Each structure stands twice: as structure tokens, then as C-alpha cells.
Amino acid sequence: MARSGCSISGAIEPTLSGDPASIRPRLIQAALSLAPGTWNPAWRYGDIVRAQLGLAARIAIDPRRVLGKIGMRTMNGLKGRFLVPQLGSREFRPIAELATYRDVEDFAAHGDDYRATRLYRWLKQSADEGMPVTARGIVCDSEQRMLDYYFTYLGLFRSLQQRGYAYRGDDEICFGVTADGGIVHMRRGTHRLASAHFLKLPLVTGLVTHADPVWVDQAVRRNGGGPLAAIALSLRPFQAPGQGQAVEGQTAAQ
């Protein structure tokens, strides 16, 4: 006889891992509804948890309220997770101290005069020394590639400067929620976030892809119901105006 996937913590994960991908999301949602505690191994399926949250995980926040960006080496070990214990104590750097922020300062100060920028000089020197920089998957080993990279992000900066923040696409900024409800930048959209921070734009948007289990437990106790719906309710203060109605049907189903 097959085991129930939701009886005890030791029985959940083996049952889930053997199921076809088409029914796994429903089993994980059921497991979390029956046992919402953050000890439940179903939380380890971070990509499925994120997919189940969907648009309910989309938030809008003043870029200057973002505590900092998680270090790349730390982030590499967290990509598959949703829950991150002690997230607020992990290695991160304030947005205004990132190298990307220095690039944004160059865009503002020098514009089309790329030769005057720290960014161009760094790319050029690295290539001349036989160690070209790989940026966004492109090896900047030629003048043309360096200029393509520079003017791509100069164009982004100018667009934000002229039109404000209105991103919609597959490369949303990924945010995490700390135990006390603070927001940290996990990955993606660093140039957008740094530019918006520099320009003092009122908000940027992105998806909550990670959370401290302490915050999740508090959300469940405070809101009741299933944990995904509880998370969605706790994220509502961060939603852009008019977003609440768009996700109402989705969160109610959770």
C-alpha cells in the first residue's frame, strides 16, 4: 500500500519526489495545507512554491528601502530554496555600495562619453591583460562588445530617468523577506534596482522568491488558512496600487 504523502515529515519527501511533475504541485500544496509548519520538507520545492504563489508574490517597494543585495556565492546556494533561515544575517551589501551603483554614477556623470568612465576603463584593461570580463553571458573581449554592454545599460538608465519604472518581463527582480519583514535583493535586475535607487524613483517591482521561515510562521499564525494564502496576505502591504484585485481570485484558491 502506498504511503500517505502528508502523514509525518519523514514520509512526505519520498512520496513527493517520486510523483510526475504534473501532479507534484497539487501534492505539495496539499502537504503544506495539512502541515503548514516550516519543518515540512515540502517547502524544499522552492520553484513549485514560487509558481503556486504566482502574481501574489509580486511586490512594489521604494528601492531605498531594500536593505542590500545578497552576495553571489551565497545566492548560488539558495536558488532552489524558498525558505532561508536567518536571511537577514546572510552576507549582503547595501545597494549604494555595489559596483553596479558605481556604473550608474558613471552613466549620470558622463553619458555618451564612455571613455571617461570607470566601467569602460575596467573592461578595456581586463581585455588588454587577457582576462576579459564576462558580463550578462557576453565576453567583453572586443571594443564593440564593450560598447554594446555600456550603451545597453546607459539606455536603461536613461529610460528609467525619463519614464520611471514600468518593467514587465521574464527577468523580474527577485526579493527575499527577512524574519522581521525587511526586504533584500536576491538576484536579477541589479542595474534596474541600482538606477532606480540613484534616481530616487518611488518604487520598483519584483517577485518575492525567498523568505525567512520565522516570517512565514508569523504570517500563518497571523492570517490563518493555508500557508501560501497567508504569505500572499502578508505581502499585500507591498503590492502596487490596484494589484490586490488582480490576485484576489488566485489567493482565495490557495
Image: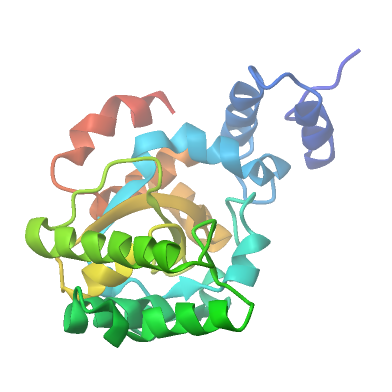
Furthest-right residue in this view = 1
Q: Residue at x 51, y 55 (%)?
A: 210
In the depicted view, which residue is nearer to us: 131 or 160? 131
209 on left or right of 198: right
Q: As displayed, is residue 218 above or below residue 251?
A: below
In the depicted view, which residue is nearer to us: 128 or 156? 128
Quarter of the rendering occupied by the N terminus: top right
Q: Is residue 226 visible?
A: no
Which x, y percent locates residue 180? 43, 70
11 on left or right of 83: right
Q: Residue at x 39, y 75 (%)?
A: 100
Q: As displayed, is residue 133 above or below residue 34?
A: below
Color encoding of the figure: rainbow
44 on left or right of 177: right
Which x, y percent locates residue 185? 43, 65
**Quarter-wise, where is residue 183 in the image?**
bottom left
Which x, y percent locates residue 178? 47, 67
53 on left or right of 117: right
Which x, y percent locates residue 80? 64, 49
Q: As displayed, is residue 98 above or below residue 15?
A: below
| Tally of marks | 0
Q: Residue at x 57, y 58 (%)?
A: 213
In the depicted view, which residue is nearer to us: 242 or 234? 242
**Quarter-wise, where is residue 191 in the image?**
bottom left
Furthest-left residue in this view = 162
Quarter of the rendering occupied by the C terminus: top left
**Quarter-wise, where is residue 199 in the image?**
bottom left
Q: Residue at x 19, y 61 (%)?
A: 203
